Amino acid sequence: MVIDGALPLGLIANTAAMLGISIGKLHPEMVGEDVTDASSLLHAGISIYPISMLKGDETLLKELRHKLYEPEFSALTAVDFSDVAQKINVYADYAKKSSETPESGHAYFGIAIFGEKKKVNRLTGMLPLLRS
C-alpha cells in the first residue's frame, strides 16, 4: 500500500482500511485460515502476505496510478482510494460522482497493489515506509 503521508492520521487509517477491504475482496486467497489460540479461542484469518505501508505524496500517487494503467503492469491488481470516494457516505452517490469525475479530477489518498513481486517492487521499491 502506498498512502499520502501528508494526510491526517485518521484519513491515513481510513484509506488503509478501505484499500485492505477491497484488495481482500478481489484476492480472498491472500487471507489465511482462522486459527485457534492456546485457550481454544478462535481468531479470524489474516493476510498470509506481508503488507508494506509505504509513503507517497499526491503527485507520486497520481504518477503511480497512471503507470498501473500501462500494459506492462496490467497483470497487477490495483485498488485506489481518492477524495471522490472519501467525501461521500452513500455508495450509490459515490458511483454517480465517480462517473461524472474524470480521472484527472481524482486526488488519490492511497493505492494498494497486489501481484508479481518483481513488478510491484519496480513500482514501489524506492519508496520509504510510512511512519508516524
Image (cartoon, grey):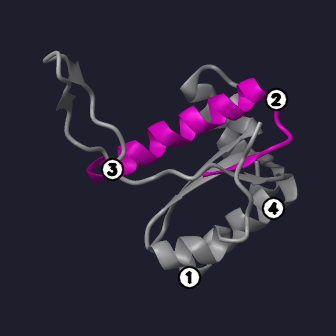
Pick whichever of labels 4 and 1 is earlier in the sequence: 4
Q: Which residue is mark 3?
A: 48
Look at mark 1 in the image and give the residue it sits on.
71
In the picture, the disc for residue 12 is: none
Pair 2/3: label in front? 3
Residue occupied by mark 4? 60
Q: Is residue 40 above or below residue 36?
A: above
Sequence-wise, which precedes: disc 4 or disc 2? Answer: 2
Q: Which residues are magenta?
A: 1-30
Mark 1, mark 3: which one is toward the viewer? 3
Residue 9 located within the stretch drawn in magenta: yes
Secondary element at tag 2? loop
Marks 1 and 2 sit apart, C-alpha to C-alpha, by 34 Å
* Mark 1: amino acid: Pro
At 68% across and 73% down in the image, what residue appears?
67
**Precedes in sequence: disc 1 or disc 2:** 2
Circle 2 sits on which residue?
8
Nearer the N terminus, badge 2 or badge 3? 2
| Local SS, label 3 | loop
| 92 sits to left or right of 41 | right
Instruction: Choose mark 4 or mark 2, whichever is in front.
Output: 2
CA gap, disc 2 and disc 3: 29 Å
From mark 4 to mark 1, how far is it between C-alphas? 19 Å
